[in-house]
Image (cartoon, rainbow, N blue to C red):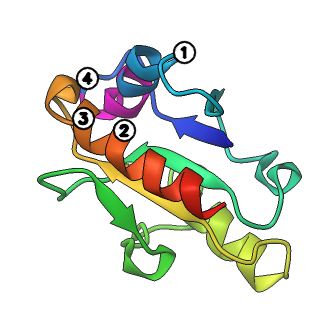
Amino acid sequence: MRVLVFGNPAAKEDSSAVEIAKRLEGKMPGVEFVLFDTAEDLEKEGPAPVILDVVFGLKAPKIVRLGQLEKPANPISLHGFDLIWSLLLLKKIGKLRSATIIGVPPGSPSKSIAKVEKILRKVSARR
């Protein structure tokens, strides 16, 4: 199972998913972590990608449905056109059936590793 990892390793508040993926790499047979810089090639990952990303407002890692994510206020600027908007657009044009988004809280990735691993094992078993 490929897990698409989003985040910015240089920004502390946006680096938790990247850190978690680095720490779990090689420890979960059958799980491949792929760092994604931007969402521009997301449609090539198939109709139901598994995504690991920071979700602000979470206190612990969990699966977040696409409809639960808050849309940025200004979708017109490039800053506002991020992963959420890309997923919504792909769904609307029929290139995305669903997305399993494993949201992690910003900061303290070491507190989230065990929970993310547990979630990934459940998701992997269902695929």
What amino acid is labelled 4 in the image?
A: Lys
Give the image quarter of residue 88: bottom right
Which stretch appears magenta? 13-19
Which is nearer the N-term, disc 3 or disc 1? 1
Q: Is residue 54 visible?
A: yes
* Front-lying residue, 12 or 59: 59
Q: Secondary structure at mark 2?
A: helix
Q: Secondary structure at mark 4?
A: helix
Q: Residues within 10 Å of mark 1 (few under 14, many from 20)?
A: few
Could you tell me how far apart the alpha carbons at marks 4 and 3 are, in whole angstroms?
20 Å
User: What residue is shown with label 2?
Assistant: 117
- Residue drawn where x is 27% and y is 31% of the image: 113
- In front: mark 4 or mark 3? 3
Q: Residues within 10 Å of mark 4 (few under 14, many from 20)?
A: few
What amino acid is labelled 2 in the image?
A: Glu
Which is nearer the N-term, disc 4 or disc 2? 4
Chief secondary structure of the magenta portion: helix
Could you tell me how far apart the alpha carbons at marks 3 and 1 are, in whole angstroms?
15 Å
User: What residue is shown with label 1?
Assistant: 26
What amino acid is labelled 3 in the image?
A: Ala
Could you tell me how far apart the alpha carbons at marks 2 and 1 are, in whole angstroms?
12 Å
Could you tell me how far apart the alpha carbons at marks 4 and 1 are, in whole angstroms?
24 Å
- Decide: marks 4, 1 in contact (CB < 8 A)? no
